[in-house]
Amino acid sequence: MGKWTRRGFITAGVLTGGGMILGVGLGVAVRPGHRAPKLAPLVAKDDEVLVNAWVKILPDNTVTAIVPHCEMGQGVHTSLPMMLADEMDADWGKVAMEQAPAHEEYANFHMARSHLFPGKVPGLVQDTLDGAFLKLTQSLSLQTTGGSFSVRATGTLGMRVAGAAAREMLIGAAARQWGVATTELRAENSHIYHDASGRIEPFITFAAAAAENKPPSQPKLKEPSQFKLMGRNIARIDIPAKVNGTAGFGIDVDLPGMKYATVKAAPVFGSKVVSIDSKEAEKLPGVIKVVNLEDSVGVIAEGYWQAKKALDKITVKYSPSDAYSLDQESMFERFGQDMDKATANQEEKVDFTTGDSRVVLAAAETVIEAEYRVPFLAHATMEPMNCTAWMHGDQLEFWAGMQNPLGARDAVANELNLQKHKVTAHNVYLGGGFGRRARPDYPLQAAKLAMALPGVPIKMIWSREEDTQQDFYRQAVMSRFRASLAPSGLPEAWENQFVDKHEPVEAPYIPYAINNQYIHYTDSPTHVRFGAWRSVDHSHHGFFTESFIDELAFAAQVDPYEYRRKLLVNEPRLMKVLEKAAEISRWGRKLPKGWGQGIALQQSFGTLVAQVVEVDMTQGSPRVDRVFCTVDPGFAVNPDGMIAQMESGIIFGLTAALYGEISLEKGAVVQSNFHDYPMVRMNTAPKITVSIINSMEAIGGAGEPGTPAVAPALTNAIFAATGKRIRELPVSKFDNRYDIKTSS
């Protein structure tokens, strides 16, 4: 944690009324910029004053954290205020949360800076970097919640610094007013104390005086031993409203005079609407208007069901596409052909290389080869895509759950030739995101429908079928491996070729001590829309690499856990995580006949995870009984939230491993709803045990790292129980085709 202590950049601002807002200042050139005048109209009410970006102190002494991230169940509307309040020594009972508006002044520059410059930098350089990254993220319309960056970037670089600076400013103002040294004062529970005289005053008493002074650019942050909130299990701010039903999601938006709409897009991506026959649809009761959206058709009606029934009556002709001939098997054949061609023509795109794996492989006596496949995957959020839009006068407003509200606002303004300041995006709770709600397609559709009926609010809701068949999908991937084994059974060379590379760049890399590695890829694009899916490339590379390392362990006749230990000699953190997972799962104990244990690990988004799956194969198809998970996030800000995210990621990844498959027929998605794209449900969910290791290294993410390891741990467990090696997901393809081993 100490490495974060010099990440400070604060500026002071103005004061009016009875409240103070403090926050992180951004560098402009070499000097910190004074952004308060720009931000004041965005977040300060009549009795509040904006001094900077991230904290408000109100007349009743409430501290409000302004959070530039959405809440989709991951708990950042609690963990980020915790980090700020702890550094500020605020009373948690008087801390509130306010989501930052979708405005360029709240672009997510901490996320961008953390990605490219994670290390400590001098103060002047830091200010310059912050100013540059603010401009960069503004130009990219970046206000994203994703990549498991909220806590490790905005929390560490923004919230902690803002809270610490606020505390120092308030203490400084109190020292001047009382005529004492700052060293004689302390902050606690949103009050300033002078123990020698017995004086105690709330933060708000010193707000005006504090706001007149420039904040320290690098305030002193707390050491972990000083934390009062961070590291504790704190009840989430969003849970009560979600339990009692008062939480507002996009689908709950209700405006006076509102009408409803639904849409149907071209079944094959890339096709456009050529003609529409809507005569029968327009005769139905409640139908108001049929709208051509170029690549889709929308119906506006008095109610959603009326719009949906009318949509079913419309005949649409779409433009032709070469993709009409593409199905699942031909797509994988194309992947293989493109990989073969790249190898034959020496056109591989090198991802990572060390040593000379091909020379070693050519001379090796024992070479293990395997090919793996994973299909497209949909996000299948609990709340289907929806957005309410209202065009009134020259102003357009829209309400939706969005992972990038600023990006959605700018996309709508650009597409519809509207001035950005005349477009307002209202973000609400997201009923699941997983990367899907980072795309602006559904706000764009709603905005176009609203412009087709000016003055009337339009709530557009996708059907579940539309949601399944018009997603931005996790890509289908083929991956091939070759490895040579030394007489000891340990690998001497490792070669991996796969199709298509996205993010994070390190996803295909392995932590194991293998001297000769060659990892390369080949582009083999399809017409199917790609989108970030929880853990992105780690979701499939975790399955590939951890499955293949298990195959090497079997070939070497070494226990898979012990095999990994031998190869982690240079990775002490991963070793501890692996060993702890083995400990809590009682790895290697005797299991009932037809049961198996599988193990896997993955380092992603700054967090290390090892998982053990126990599976019962006695019924011919997998029943996952237990999942054991050990996670090292560096430091768990809210341990209960960390556990919840591991559980969530495991269920998400287990669903994909067991059932998840989006397949193509004549270029279109076959699946349409939960009957043919099923989920793990409560009655099929395993018992999950999570153990946290606080190594006190840099804080890692929580939202995504729980997903990648569960698929290989499952298939490795199936192999242990049946001797059947699964190299293609989902495993449900092979139900009732397993032979139970005579012993386990």
Image (spheres, rainbow, N blue to C red):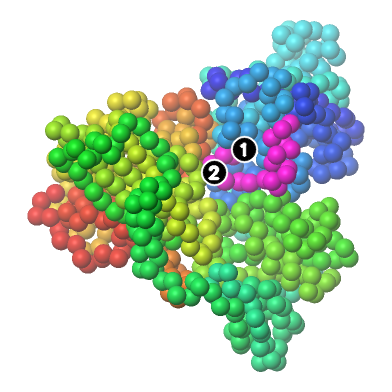
Q: Residue at x 87, y 39 (%)?
A: 47
Decide: is 680 above or below 691. Answer: below
Percent coordinates x, y for residue 354 in the rendering:
35, 32
Percent coordinates x, y for residue 167 in the rendering:
72, 22
Spatial CA span between label 2 and label 1: 9 Å
The residue carrying pointer 1 sits among few (fewer than 14), some (14 to 19) or many (20 or more) residues within 10 Å by Cα, namely many
Q: Residue at x 52, y 58 (%)?
A: 530
Percent coordinates x, y for residue 302 in the rendering:
72, 80
The numbered dot on residue 160 is none
Determine if residue 193 is in view: yes
The residue carrying pointer 2 sits among few (fewer than 14), some (14 to 19) or many (20 or more) residues within 10 Å by Cα, namely many
Number of labelled discs? Answer: 2
Decide: is 111 above or below 205. Answer: below
The amino acid marked with disc number 2 is: Gly
Residue 316 placement, left or right of 647: right
Which residue corresponds to mark 2?
147
Q: Nearer the viewer, residue 143 or 680?
A: 143
- Residue 739 lies within the magenta run: no
Residue 279 placement, left or right of 646: right
Determine if residue 189 is in view: no
Magenta range is: 131-150
The amino acid marked with disc number 1 is: Met
**N-terminal label among 2 and 1:** 1
Residue 700 placement, left or right of 622: right
Q: Nearer the viewer, residue 183 or 35?
A: 35
Secondary structure under badge 1? helix
Which residue corresponds to mark 1?
111
- Residue 133 lies within the magenta run: yes
